[in-house]
Image (tube, grey):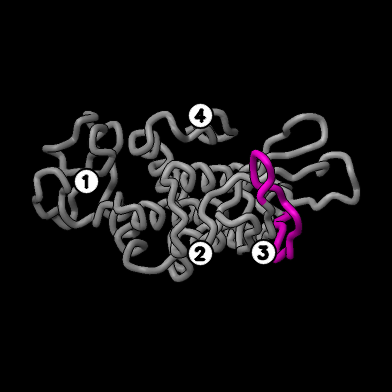
Amino acid sequence: MEHDAKGLAIVIRSMKIKERDRLLTLFSPSLGIVNAVSYGSRKSIRAVKAPLYTEGTFSLEKGRSCMTLKDIDVISTHDAVHEDLDLSQSAMLFSDLVLTGKSAEPELYALYSAALDALEYEPYEKVVVEFIVHFLSLEGLCSDYLTCPVCGRDYQKDEVLGFSSSEGVPVCHDCDTMNGALLLPPNARAYLRRSVELGFQPSLDLSVSAEQEHRIFRYLLRTLPFSFPGKLRSLEYGVWRI
């Protein structure tokens, strides 16, 4: 990275350091995932501030030991995300998933940004479901919900799927390694398959009952620790009980 850098980014993690400063982790489609220190942001009213989930054009400068935040042209601060525990938990999960993948592809950035925006006007469980599905798809980890990824057999229309803890994906009954602990019924499978086919924004318009949406939400949260063992602190220490 050059001595001065500028690009679109979102603050996906913010940590207190020393007495006055913050260490920001920025997610940028042009700069990658980078750390930058915001000096004086905790004390000085004159310091440039970039709260968690702030999106904008960031100007960074190469310091002696790290990048520093010089300026920011703010697009959104996503204030509503900070005002509700479930919304905050959702955004934390999105950030965790981005950091596990260590990818800064423009498609992933667009998904993350759109999901933060959607949290401000859509039910959070729906947004979480669609973010997870499309994140897994971008990472090449998503099932097509048509064929068992282990044995290759086509699913029957009304087949209930099991789960492979070793592969971290839904599978047919014969390949289920969890003895039916994580079951995916046909109607939920059809919903997820349709979500995969659509883009993130159109998938938010899919119609499903609140009860069914909650079941799918819980199912996906319970599967994630098998796909990313030991890496999702937002689920391990967060407010949701899954």
Of pointers 3 and 2, the one earlier in the residue sequence: 3
> What residue is disc 2 on?
110
Of pointers 1 and 4, the one earlier in the residue sequence: 1
Q: Amino acid at mark 1?
A: Val
Q: Nearer the viewer, mark 3 or mark 2?
A: 3
> What residue is disc 3 on?
57
Of pointers 4 and 2, the one earlier in the residue sequence: 2
> What residue is disc 4 on?
236
Q: CA distance from mark 3 to mark 1?
A: 47 Å
Q: Amino acid at mark 4?
A: Glu
Q: CA distance from mark 4 to mark 2?
A: 26 Å
Q: Residue at x 58, y 57 (%)?
A: 2
Local crowd size for mark 4, using a 10 Å CA cut-off: few (<14), some (14–19), many (≥20): few
Local crowd size for mark 3, using a 10 Å CA cut-off: few (<14), some (14–19), many (≥20): some
Q: CA distance from mark 3 to mark 2?
A: 15 Å
Q: Amino acid at mark 2?
A: Ala
Secondary element at tag 1: loop
Of pointers 2 and 1, the one earlier in the residue sequence: 2
Q: CA distance from mark 4 to mark 3?
A: 32 Å
Relative side of 163 to 85, left or right: left
Q: CA distance from mark 1 to mark 4?
A: 28 Å
> What residue is disc 1 on?
160
Relative side of 26 to 228, left or right: right
Task: Indicate the position of residue 37 as horizontal and vertical percent values.
Answer: 70, 43
Secondary element at tag 4: helix
Q: Nearer the viewer, mark 2 or mark 1?
A: 2
Relative side of 124 to 225, left or right: right
Q: Amino acid at mark 3?
A: Thr
Q: Which residues are magenta?
A: 62-79
Q: Nearer the viewer, residue 45 or 235?
A: 45
Is residue 57 highlighted in magenta?
no
